[in-house]
Image: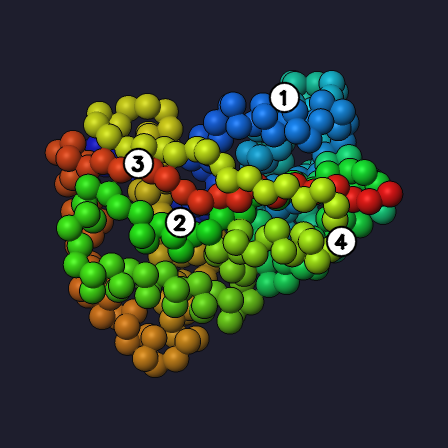
Amino acid sequence: MSLLLGINIMNSMKQGHSANFMNAYRDHWWNTGFLKDMAIRLDLDQKSSLLDVGCGQCHWSKVLLPYLSNNPVICAVDNDDHWIEQKEIPAAYFNAKGADFHMQKADASQLPFEDNSFDLVTCQTLLIHVEYPEQVITEMKRVLKPNGVILCAEPNNRVQQLIRTSMTEDRSIDEVLDHVKYALLYEEGKKVLGQGDNSLGDLLPGLIAEAEFEDIEVRLSDKAIAMYPPYDRKDQVATLQQWAAGDHISATGTDERDYFQTMGPESLAFYESYHAKYMNQLDELLDALEEGSYHSGGGALMYVVSAEKST
């Protein structure tokens, strides 16, 4: 198991609640060709002001920066003190690139900006973590200039349980159903606790339409991080680090057991039996990686939805 022994999992658990979900893995979520095509479609080179809502470490706004107009104004907001305390790090990056960067703590449903302030308002995997995404979309629209663009990237996460790997291709139907049931109960418990919907991406175009945006366009990211030996590409290494950093604490800081408990005794019993039945999965994965026998196409389902605010 030496492949991953150099990664300190406990350090990741001591960071901000969203820290395990904000590492270098996100730097490899997008293909350059996809981004270039998107930039052309949305005339990003005409956008001189951007607001990144739920920014974290500003991975998403860093990705978009090269496609904006020269010397843009980049504003970023997040409600996690961990990222606000480290805002000098993204500030140094953006300032070195000629951007005027500002970051502050704020609630996505109450943005601290005037109406009609930005050419582009965007988020990446934010709406899956909020109780009322409609409110956030309404706020994003409010601070968007007339003819400005809203751009949201949100996934369907439940589909991952049906994507095959070299380790899962021989699973019985009952085992596959166990994993799907686990994912569904996790999602439902998270929603009941008001912490969002992990697969909101499916519903995002409809929410944008309900907010009365125009020219709605829906794309799926074409990025797949395929895993195969010797696992030494940058995106593969970052993926391995993400897997190692993952634990039972969610992006909101809630223990996943709480999601099942809130769904009732039967769901909690399923949670306990599931973990007892599949407690060796991580060790088996690490062994397969060490042996070089693990491989996967690495597909995901990420929606990229854009629209314009009417004049």
Identify the secondary structure beneath mark 2: helix
Nearest to viewer (mark 4 / mark 2): 4
Q: Earlier in the sequence, mark 1 or mark 2?
A: 2
Which residue type carries mark 1?
A: Pro
Relative height, residue 130 to residue 113 (above, below): below
Nearest to viewer (mark 1 / mark 2): 1
Distance between the Cα atoms at labels 4 and 2? Answer: 41 Å
Distance between the Cα atoms at labels 1 and 3? Answer: 29 Å
Residue at the (41%, 76%) spot, across then down: 263
Nearest to viewer (mark 1 / mark 3): 3
Residue density around tag 1, few if under 14, some if 14–19, many if 20 or more, within 10 Å: some
Residue at the disc numbered 1: 66
Distance between the Cα atoms at labels 1 and 2? Answer: 33 Å
Left or right of 164, for residue 277 = left
Residue at the (78%, 38%) spot, across then down: 148
Identify the secondary structure beneath mark 1: helix
Residue at the (54%, 61%) spot, across then down: 196
Residue density around tag 3, few if under 14, some if 14–19, many if 20 or more, within 10 Å: some
Q: Earlier in the sequence, mark 1 or mark 3?
A: 1
Residue at the disc numbered 3: 297
Percent across and percent down for residue 104 are 70, 43
User: Which quadrant would the C terminus be assigned to in this image?
Assistant: top right
Nearest to viewer (mark 1 / mark 4): 4
Percent across and percent down for residue 131 are 60, 63
Relative height, residue 260 to residue 288 (above, below): below
Residue at the disc numbered 2: 13
Residue at the disc numbered 4: 212
